[in-house]
Image (cartoon, rainbow, N blue to C red):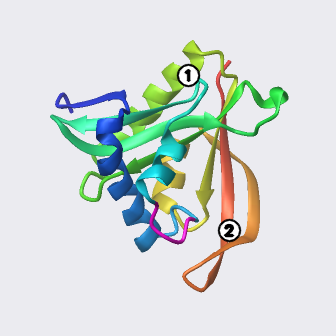
Amino acid sequence: MAAYRLENLAEAHLEAVRQIYNHYILNSTATFHARPLTHEEMAELVFFPDPRHRAFVILDGETVCGYAFIARHKPREAYDFTGEVSVYLKPGYESKGLGSMALRHLEEHAIAHGFHVLLATICGQNEASLQLFARNGFSQCAHFREVGRKFGQWLDVIVCQKILD
């Protein structure tokens, strides 16, 4: 896995990241967005005003093969030490250890920036993500039944958490 690395997501990566995310919008329940995002909408998802919240690209050489981010959980001060994390891989890059690599990177960033808890909100159908987070020390803390609707079906949401300190 020596060829893979993470670096801060920059404007130059935005189109590749948008293509990855739009793939999941159109072909899966991994995200509850229902229509492809524009360049501007994608920028709002991955560029944050607070530097504690950050997005990273996963690179294979110079090819963007995924991205991951730690975002604000809720816009209230009491949640300032809780981050929400997500990882998306370009099709064909699954099962290479990149998700775990990205989660370790997010966790290191979170610890360095004073986060106490990381949360992941995952569609109940997304077994691969549920397994990824479980393998990396996250445990299920909530299960919301039939709270989303996509592709004509009701979808559950599972929240997993990891306490960092």
- Which residue is found at the position 56% from the left and 22% from the top? 51
**Mark 2 = which residue?**
156
Q: Disc 1 on helix, strand or loop?
A: loop
Residue 137 visible (yes or no): no
Q: Which residues are magenta?
A: 33-37
Q: Position of residue 148 (x, y in %)?
A: 68, 71
Q: Position of residue 157 (x, y in %)?
A: 67, 61
Q: Is residue 140 above or below residue 146?
A: above
Left or right: 144 in relation to 93: right
Q: Is residue 148 above or below residue 52?
A: below
Check residue 82 in the rendering and tell me which mark sits there, or answer none. none
36 inside magenta stretch = yes
**Mark 1 = which residue?**
51
Going from N to C along the chain, the mark reached first, 2 or 1, is: 1
Q: Is residue 34 above or below residue 101?
A: below
Out of 125 and 115, give the one closest to the viewer: 115
Residue type indicated by callout 2: Asp
Q: Disc 2 on helix, strand or loop?
A: strand
- Which residue is found at the position 55% from the left and 34% from the top? 70
27 inside magenta stretch = no
